[in-house]
């Protein structure tokens, strides 16, 4: 499956660094992937929703590690390019409600 476009929407928050929108084969788009500052560096989180027990469940996600790695690599590469274009940013803000354990 070809990833035909990755768009990054930067955020200036303590943990949430960006949202990503990814288009596959110029035919299918997935919104609200997140670039998050995790405990061991930047990670990519799939779009998710909160379920009744208070945990989060992915809405869409890769089904094999090879594709997941390719997707994460492309998103993080585009994120770094956007950060470089944006230049210096002020201190991040703390956002309420972003409590997915990252």
Image (cartoon, helix red, strand yellow):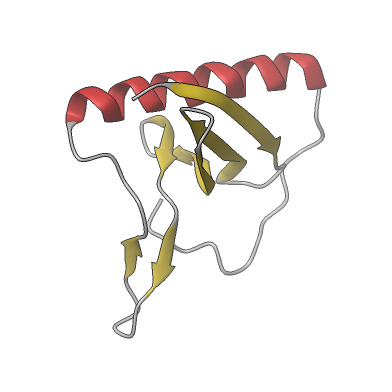
Above or below residue 50? Residue 81 is above
Above or below residue 89? Residue 96 is below
Find residue 53 and report its horizontal and vertical position in percent: 29, 83
Of all residues shown, which one is farthest toward the left? Answer: 64
Quadrant for the N terminus, please: top left
Return the residue nearer the eye: 2 or 14.
2
Find residue 36 and report its horizontal and vertical position in percent: 50, 41
Of all residues shown, which one is farthest toward the bottom? Answer: 52
Above or below residue 82? Residue 93 is below
Of all residues shown, which one is farthest toward the front? Answer: 27
30 vs 52, left or right, is right
Marks counted in the figure total: 0
67 vs 71, left or right, is left
Find residue 58 and report its horizontal and vertical position in percent: 33, 58
Q: Quadrant of residue 69?
A: top left
Return the residue nearer the eye: 53 or 91.
53
Return the residue nearer the eye: 33 or 36.
33
Q: Quadrant of residue 101?
A: bottom left
Taking the spot 20% from the left edge, 40% from the top edge, the residue there is 63
45 vs 75, left or right, is left
Taking the spot 53% from the left edge, 35% from the top edge, the residue there is 22
Return the residue nearer the eye: 26 or 44.
26
Taking the spot 17% from the left edge, 33% from the top edge, the residue there is 64
Q: Quadrant of residue 98?
A: bottom right
Find residue 97 and report its horizontal and vertical position in percent: 57, 69
């Amino acid at each position: 499956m070809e990833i035909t476009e990755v768009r990054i929407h930067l955020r200036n928050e303590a943990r949430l660094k960006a949202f990503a929108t990814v288009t596959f084969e110029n035919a299918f788009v997935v919104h609200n992937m997140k670039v998050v500052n995790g405990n061991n560096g930047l990670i990519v989180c799939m779009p998710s929703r909160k379920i009744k027990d208070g945990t989060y469940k992915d809405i869409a996600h890769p089904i094999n590690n090879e594709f997941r790695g390719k997707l994460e690599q492309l998103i993080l590469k585009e994120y770094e390019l956007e950060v470089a274009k944006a230049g210096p940013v002020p201190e991040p803000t703390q956002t309420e409600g972003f409590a997915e354990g990252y």
